[in-house]
Image (tube, rainbow, N blue to C red):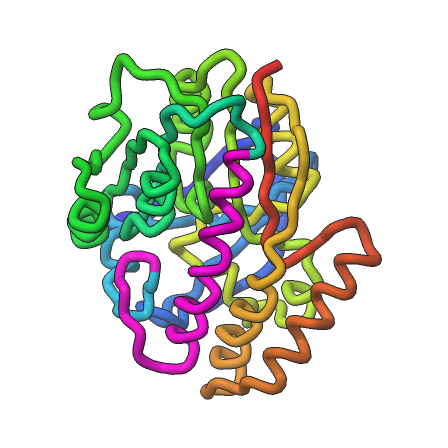
């Protein structure tokens, strides 16, 4: 097992960090990891962290649902019900931001549910998924060859590129983001969804907030830090949208981590409180979608 320590903030490049929170990996390893906060730009990230060659073992769990289609247990069943709704919403979103249905790239496409919905809607689809099992499931579902990495995507330009809860997992944050932006058409749209560390449920659960998900989540974004990152890459933020169901799902996972069992009523109440808070206080929902275009 090898770990790496970042000496510079991935967004502003400064070297001064302070410890923000110590979080336990309840899903797989039971190890504890430190989340630090940049004293200059407030970006939060897991530091130190497993390096890219060592991170795979932290995904080796049936609990990691985006790499499987497991449907046992109340949390997994709830996930699949909600996913059918949010997948339709995602397709509606890309249609709203594209002049016509062309080619879409979903980076970190998991088992391919969103990509398949895009294909059924008339889009020409491409997907990238590094996890072998998820990639095979995505290929089987969509009937398309799913790439293992961006090196397999060449000579193409895309109307839409999406990352649904993926950016927080990528070791080479700036390099990968630059590569993806280079694959956009001049009038193309980049759509990024991430958990929001400024949300009410994050403040409530603190170290038990499931969306910290260390060490798989290397970065812990907020609206200000995501805006700084997009600006760094010369992208213009078009809109910020909520993912309201995430407050309930993340609260269910957080309650399970905190109490050792699923507490449905508490999760629903806390999810509702989080969304209500966000509606009144600057759109700080549990997860946010950032829609950006080239300058």
- Prevalent SS, magenta region: helix
**Residue 279: % across, % down:** 78, 57
Q: Is residue 62 left or right of residue 295?
A: left
**Which residue is depicted at the point 36% across and 46% down?**
117
**Which residue is depicted at the point 60% across and 65% down?**
247
**Residue 175: % across, % down:** 40, 25
> Residue extending furthest right?
280
Q: Is residue 114 left or right of residue 243?
A: left
Q: Is residue 132 left or right of residue 20?
A: left
Dividing the picture into quarters, in which one does residue 280 lie?
bottom right
Dividing the picture into quarters, in which one does residue 146 lie?
top left
Q: Nearer the viewer, residue 125 or 54?
A: 125
**Residue 209: % across, % down:** 56, 67
Up the image or down, 199 lies above or below 14; here it is: below
Residue 19 visible to the viewer: no
Q: Nearer the viewer, residue 2 or 97?
A: 97
Q: Is residue 74 magenta?
A: yes
Up the image or down, 236 lies above or below 69; here it is: above
Residue 286 visible to the viewer: yes
Q: Is residue 82 magenta?
A: yes
Up the image or down, 215 lies above or below 29; here it is: above
Q: Nearer the viewer, residue 290 or 112?
A: 112
Give the extent of the magenta segment: 66-95
**Residue 267: % across, % down:** 59, 79
Image quarter hosting the C terminus: top right
**Which residue is depicted at the point 62% across and 60% down?**
244
Up the image or down, 259 lies above or below 164; here it is: below
């Amino acid at each position: 097992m090898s770990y790496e320590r970042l000496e510079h903030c991935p967004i502003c490049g400064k070297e001064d960090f302070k410890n923000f929170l110590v979080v336990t990996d309840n899903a797989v390893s039971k190890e504890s990891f430190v989340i630090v906060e940049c004293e200059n730009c407030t970006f939060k990230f897991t530091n130190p962290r497993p390096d890219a060659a060592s991170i795979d073992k932290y995904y080796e769990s049936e609990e990691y649902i985006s790499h499987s289609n497991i449907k046992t247990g109340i949390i997994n069943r709830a996930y699949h019900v909600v996913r059918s709704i949010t997948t339709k919403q995602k397709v509606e979103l890309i249609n709203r931001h594209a002049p016509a249905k062309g080619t879409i790239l979903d980076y970190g496409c998991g088992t391919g549910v969103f990509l398949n919905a895009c294909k059924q809607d008339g889009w020409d689809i491409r997907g990238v998924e590094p996890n072998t099992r998820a990639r095979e499931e995505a290929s089987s579902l969509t009937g398309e060859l799913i790439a293992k990495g961006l090196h397999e995507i060449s000579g193409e330009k895309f109307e839409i590129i999406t990352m649904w809860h993926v950016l927080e997992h990528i070791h080479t944050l700036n390099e990968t983001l630059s590569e993806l932006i280079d694959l956009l058409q001049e009038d193309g749209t980049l759509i990024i969804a991430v958990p929001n560390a400024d949300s009410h449920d994050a403040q409530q659960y603190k170290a038990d907030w499931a969306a910290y998900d260390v060490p798989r989540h290397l970065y812990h974004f907020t609206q200000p830090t995501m805006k700084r990152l997009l600006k760094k890459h010369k992208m213009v933020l078009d809109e910020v949208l909520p993912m309201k169901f995430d407050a309930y799902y993340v609260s269910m996972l957080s309650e399970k981590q905190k109490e050792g069992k699923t507490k449905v009523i508490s999760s629903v109440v806390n999810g509702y409180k989080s969304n209500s808070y966000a509606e009144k206080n600057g759109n700080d929902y549990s997860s946010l979608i950032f829609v950006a275009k080239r300058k």
